[in-house]
Image (tube, grey):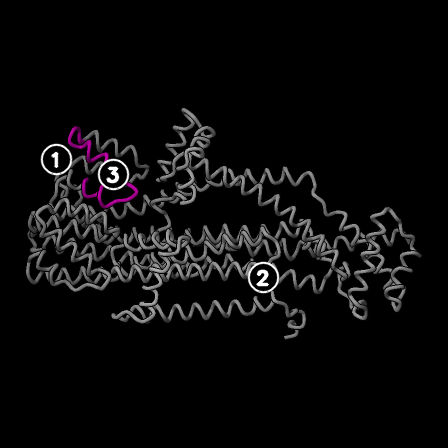
C-alpha cells in the first residue's frame, strides 16, 4: 500500500475512485431490475412512473424528436405492447440523459480544455446510443429463443389436428410472439391473404418469422404433401426451421462469449491520461515540460480521439447486426435537404463518369447515401479535423503558459523538497520578477541571480542555489517556446485530409463486411431452398419467395423474378454474373435445370441429403467470421493502451532522460 502516498487527494482523484463504484452500482441495479421486470406480468410502479414520464418527454421540445424516434424503433419490432413501447422509450431516454450528463461532468472534472471536453461529449453521446442498440438487438435473441419453442409447439399441434389454421389457434408461444402469431392467423383466414402476407412482411422484421409465415400460407392454400415414407412436407419444413433457429442461437451465444463487453476497454485509456500525468509529475517534475506543452496536449487529445474511434468501431462490430440496412447519418441526411447546402455539394461533387463510378461504388456497398451526402460528410470531417487540431495547438499554448507561470516545482528529473520550507506565494513573486526583468531585455549576471534567490530563500546551499538558477532559466526558456508556430497550419491541413478520406474508408470497410454477409446469407438461402423444395413450388415461385426472404441478395432476386417470365435463362444468367461466390454460381446453374428439365426437389436433392454437412459448414463459416472480427477488435482495443504506454509514459521519460544526459555531458565538457 506504499503507492498510496504518491496519490494526491484532489477532486480528480476522488472522481477516479468514486466513478467506478457509482457505475458498478448503476449496473447492478439495472441488471437486477431487468431480471425482475422480465418475470413480472403486471406493470410495476416504476413502469407506471416511466409511462407518465414518456408523455412529459413528449411535451419537451428538445426531447420530443428523440423519444419519438425511439418509439418508432421499438414499434417496428412488433413484439412490444403499446404500454411497453412507451415505458421502454422513456427508460432509454432517461438512461441516455443520465450517461450523457455523467460523462460530461466527469470530463469537466478531468480536463481543463475545450477540445478534450468536446471529444468526451461525443463519447457521452456514443455510449448510450450503442448501449441502447445492443439492448434492442438483445430482443432478437429473446425472439429466436421463444420462436424455437413456438415452432416445436406448432409442429406438435399440426401433427395432432392436421390443419395449419387450427394449429396456429392452439400454439403455445412466448409473450413476445403473441401479437405476431395472432397477426399470422389473421393472414391465413383473410380473403385477401396475399396482400395481408406482404403487409405482414413489412411489420415483422424477423426473417425466420417471415419464412414461417410463407410456409404456413403456402401449405394452407395448396395443401400438405406426404412423401413415400409418410413424412409431411410441412413438418419437415418446421424441422429444418428449428435446426436453423438453433444454429442462430448458437451463433449469438458464441459471439456474446467471444466479445463480452470488449468495447468498454477502449475507454479505459481516457482516465489513465490523468493517472499517468499525476504520478509522473509528482515524482519527476521535469515531465511537466512535455505534459503541459503542445506535444503533451496533442498526445492526450490524440488518445481521447483514438478511444472514441475505436469504441465506435468495436461496438458496431460487436453488434449482432453489424451491417446496418441504412448507413446514413441523421444529421447529414437532414442537412442535405436544405437547397443551399445541396446545391453547394452538387457543385463540388464529381461529374459525369466519375460520378457514375462513385454511385456504382455506393450501390455495391449496399449504401443508401447519395453522392451529395457522402461529400457533405467528407467536407464536414475535414473541417472538423482542421478546427480540432488548430484549437488543440492554441489551447495547449494557453494552458501550458498558465500552468508554468504558476508552477514552482523543479523541472529536473527527480522531485525535491528543498522549497517546502518557503511560501509558494514568495517563490512565485521571485519567478515573476525574474520573468518580468528578462522580458525587458535585462540579462542576469550569476551574482545578481544568486542575490535574487537568496533574498527569497536565504537558507539554501550553494548546490540548491544552482538548481534554482537552472529552474528559473528552464522556466523562462519554456515560456518563450510557447507560441503559435507556422508548421501548426500544414499539420492541421494534413489532419483535415485524413478526415476527408474517412467516409471513403468507411465505404470500403462496408464492402468487406458485405462480402462476409453475402457468404453468410448464401448459406441461409440453401436452408430456405430445402424448405421450398419440400413445398413443391415451381422455379418462379421459389425466386419470388427468396426475393422476399433475403436482404443482401434481395435486389438480385427481384430483378430475376420480374424478368423471368420474358426469358428465364437470360434472367438466371444475369443473376449469375452479379455474384462472385462460386457456390452460388453452381446454385444458379441448378436453377437453370429446373426451367424445363428437373423439379426443384430433383435438382436440389443433394441439399436435403447433405443437410447436416451444410449446417456444419455454415457453423464453421459463422464461427470463423466471429473469430476474425474478435481478433480485429482485440487489435483495435490495444491501440489506446499502446499510445498511453509509449506516448504518455515512455516518451516523456526518454525525453527527460536524454535531456539530463546531454546537460551532464555539457557540464563535463565545461570542467
Residue 529 colored in magenta in the image: no
Quick check: 458 left or right of 190?
right
Is residue 567 in the magenta section? yes
- The stretch in magenta equals 543-568
Identify residue for label 1: 597
Q: Residue at x 33, y 37 (%)?
A: 580
Q: Quadrant of residue 327?
A: top left
User: How many angstroms separate mark 1 from mark 2 (CA)?
Assistant: 75 Å
The answer to whether residue 636 shows anywhere in this view is no
State the CA–CA distance, disc 2 to disc 3: 62 Å
Quadrant position of the N terminus in the picture: bottom right
| Quadrant (top left/top right/bottom left/bottom right) for the C terminus | bottom right
- Disc 2: which residue: 109
Q: Residue 189 location, x and y as percent?
A: 9, 52
Q: Give how far apart the Cα atoms at labels 3 and 1 are.
A: 16 Å
Tell me which secondary structure the magenta stretch mostly adopts: helix
Is 17 on the left-hand or right-hand side of 568?
Answer: right
* Residue 259 image position (x, y, % from top left): 42, 58
* Mark toward the start of the polypeptide (3 vs 1): 3
Helix or strand or loop: what does disc 3 sit on? Answer: helix
Q: Could you tell me residue 302's position as x and y percent?
A: 58, 50
Looking at the rendered image, the disc whose residue lies closer to the viewer, 1 or 2, is 2
Q: Secondary structure at mark 1?
A: loop
Identify the mark nearer the N-term, 1 or 2.
2
The residue lying furthest to the bottom in this view is 1
Which residue, given by chain and number where applicable, does mark 3 sit on? 586
Q: Residue at x 45, y 62 (%)?
A: 98
Amino acid at each position: 500500500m506504499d503507492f498510496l502516498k504518491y496519490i494526491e487527494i484532489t477532486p480528480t482523484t476522488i472522481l477516479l475512485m468514486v466513478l467506478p463504484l457509482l457505475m458498478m452500482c448503476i449496473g447492478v441495479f439495472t441488471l437486477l431490475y431487468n431480471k425482475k421486470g422480465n418475470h413480472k406480468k403486471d406493470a410495476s410502479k416504476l413502469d407506471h412512473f416511466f409511462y407518465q414520464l414518456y408523455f412529459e418527454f413528449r411535451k419537451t421540445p428538445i426531447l420530443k424528436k428523440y423519444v419519438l424516434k425511439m418509439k418508432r424503433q421499438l414499434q417496428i419490432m412488433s413484439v412490444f405492447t403499446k404500454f411497453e413501447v412507451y415505458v421502454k422509450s422513456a427508460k432509454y431516454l432517461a438512461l441516455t440523459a443520465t450517461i450523457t450528463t455523467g460523462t460530461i461532468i466527469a470530463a469537466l472534472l478531468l480536463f481543463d480544455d475545450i477540445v478534450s471536453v468536446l471529444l468526451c461529449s461525443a463519447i457521452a453521446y456514443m455510449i448510450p446510443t450503442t448501449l441502447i442498440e445492443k439492448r434492442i438487438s438483445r430482443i432478437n435473441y429473446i425472439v429466436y429463443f421463444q420462436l424455437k419453442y413456438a415452432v416445436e409447439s406448432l409442429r406438435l399441434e399440426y401433427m395432432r389436428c392436421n390443419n395449419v389454421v387450427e394449429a396456429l389457434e392452439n400454439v403455445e408461444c412466448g409473450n413476445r410472439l403473441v401479437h405476431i402469431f395472432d397477426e399470422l392467423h389473421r393472414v391465413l383466414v383473410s380473403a385477401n391473404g396475399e396482400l395481408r402476407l406482404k403487409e405482414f412482411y413489412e411489420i415483422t422484421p424477423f426473417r425466420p418469422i417471415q419464412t414461417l409465415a410463407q410456409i404456413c400460407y403456402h401449405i394452407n392454400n395448396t395443401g400438405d404433401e406426404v412423401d413415400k415414407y409418410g413424412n409431411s412436407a410441412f413438418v419437415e419444413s418446421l424441422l429444418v426451421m428449428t435446426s436453423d433457429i438453433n444454429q442462430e442461437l448458437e451463433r449469438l451465444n458464441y459471439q456474446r462469449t467471444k466479445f463480452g463487453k470488449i468495447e468498454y476497454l477502449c475507454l479505459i485509456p481516457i482516465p489513465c491520461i490523468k493517472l499517468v500525468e499525476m504520478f509522473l509529475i509528482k515524482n519527476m517534475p521535469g515531465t511537466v515540460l512535455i505534459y503541459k506543452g503542445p506535444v503533451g496536449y496533442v498526445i492526450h487529445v490524440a488518445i481521447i480521439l483514438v478511444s472514441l474511434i475505436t469504441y465506435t468501431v468495436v461496438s458496431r462490430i460487436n453488434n449482432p447486426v453489424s451491417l446496418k440496412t441504412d448507413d446514413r447519418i441523421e444529421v447529414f441526411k437532414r442537412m442535405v435537404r436544405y437547397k443551399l447546402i445541396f446545391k453547394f455539394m452538387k457543385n463540388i461533387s464529381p461529374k459525369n463518369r466519375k460520378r457514375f463510378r462513385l454511385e456504382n461504388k455506393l450501390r455495391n456497398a449496399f449504401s443508401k447515401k447519395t453522392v451529395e451526402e457522402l461529400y457533405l460528410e467528407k467536407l464536414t470531417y475535414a473541417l472538423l479535423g482542421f478546427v480540432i487540431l488548430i484549437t488543440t495547438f492554441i489551447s495547449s499554448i494557453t494552458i501550458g503558459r498558465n500552468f508554468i507561470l504558476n508552477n514552482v516545482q523543479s523541472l529536473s528529473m527527480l522531485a525535491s523538497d528543498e522549497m517546502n520550507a518557503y511560501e509558494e506565494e514568495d517563490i512565485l513573486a521571485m519567478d515573476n520578477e525574474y520573468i518580468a526583468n528578462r522580458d525587458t531585455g535585462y540579462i542576469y549576471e550569476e551574482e545578481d541571480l544568486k542575490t535574487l534567490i537568496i533574498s527569497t530563500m536565504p537558507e539554501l546551499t550553494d548546490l540548491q542555489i544552482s538548481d534554482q538558477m537552472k529552474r528559473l532559466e528552464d522556466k523562462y526558456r519554456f515560456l518563450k517556446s510557447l507560441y503559435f508556430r507556422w508548421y501548426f497550419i500544414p499539420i492541421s491541413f494534413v489532419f483535415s485530409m485524413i478526415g476527408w478520406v474517412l467516409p471513403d474508408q468507411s465505404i470500403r470497410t462496408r464492402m468487406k463486411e458485405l462480402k462476409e454477409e453475402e457468404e453468410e446469407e448464401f448459406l441461409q438461402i440453401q436452408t430456405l431452398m430445402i424448405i421450398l423444395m419440400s413445398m413443391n413450388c415451381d422455379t418462379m415461385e421459389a425466386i419470388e419467395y427468396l426475393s422476399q426472404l433475403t436482404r443482401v441478395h434481395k435486389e438480385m432476386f427481384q430483378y430475376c423474378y420480374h424478368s423471368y417470365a420474358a426469358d428465364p435463362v437470360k434472367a438466371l444468367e444475369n443473376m449469375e454474373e452479379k455474384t462472385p461466390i462460386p457456390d452460388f454460381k453452381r446454385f444458379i446453374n441448378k436453377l437453370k435445370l429446373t426451367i424445363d428439365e428437373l423439379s426443384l426437389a430433383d435438382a436440389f436433392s443433394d441439399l436435403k441429403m447433405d443437410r447436416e454437412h451444410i449446417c456444419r459448414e455454415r457453423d464453421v463459416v459463422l464461427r470463423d467470421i466471429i473469430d476474425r472480427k474478435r481478433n480485429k477488435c482485440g487489435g483495435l482495443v490495444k491501440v489506446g493502451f499502446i499510445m498511453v504506454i509509449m506516448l504518455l509514459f515512455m516518451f516523456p521519460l526518454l525525453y527527460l532522460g536524454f535531456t539530463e544526459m546531454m546537460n551532464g555531458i555539457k557540464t563535463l565538457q565545461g570542467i
